[in-house]
Image: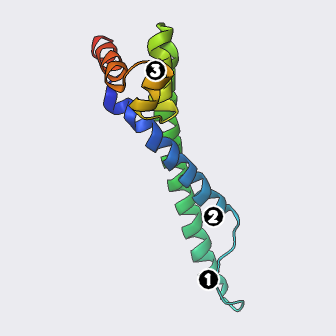
Amino acid sequence: MDKKKLEQLYYLNKEINLLNGCIKQLDCNKLPGMAVNISNSILKKLTNEIIGLKDLLTKELHMKQNEVRKINEYIDSITDDYIKEMIVLRYRNGMSWDIVGLNFNNTSNNVRMTCNRYLRKH
């Protein structure tokens, strides 16, 4: 696992929350702003479009969740508890290197370089 993949974890979680919100809105089966007197053919077309959008969003959601699962499995597989805690604080919890360093009574540069060395080796 490289640093770029780990950095994606924060944004993947944000995207998952956004996708879940969009899917919930589509699940309401309400067409906001639509007139009451709408023809059946238009309603059927709109319903099909909503179903298609929901399917696309659901596929995207599953892909993002799979990526998150892989990243979390990698983090969970780290056997060095010291390194694992640094990586969890930084990448899972989204803390800055300064805050991670404070948690270890160390400098941000030291914990950052420690993690980078570990990631290059493994």
- Identify the mark at residue 76; answer none if there is no mark: none
The residue labelled by disc 1 is 41
Mark 3 / mark 1, whichever is N-terminal: 1
Q: How crowded is mark 1: few (under 14 residues within 10 Å), some or many (20 or more)?
A: few
The residue labelled by disc 2 is 26
In this picture, is 70 found above or below 79? below
**What kind of residue is marked 2?**
Leu
Q: Which residue is drawn at 41% across and 18% down?
A: 106
Q: Which residue is drawn at 33% across and 17% down?
A: 119
Mark 2 / mark 1, whichever is N-terminal: 2
Q: How crowded is mark 2: few (under 14 residues within 10 Å), some or many (20 or more)?
A: some
Where in the figure is residue 100, as x and y percent of width and height? 45, 26
- Identify the mark at residue 86; answer none if there is no mark: 3
Q: Distance between the residues labelled 3 and 2?
A: 39 Å
In this picture, is 79 found above or below 26? above
Cβ atoms at labels 3 and 2 below 8 Å apart: no
Q: Distance between the residues labelled 2 and 1?
A: 19 Å
Judge by depth and name the residue closer to the eye, 114 or 29: 114
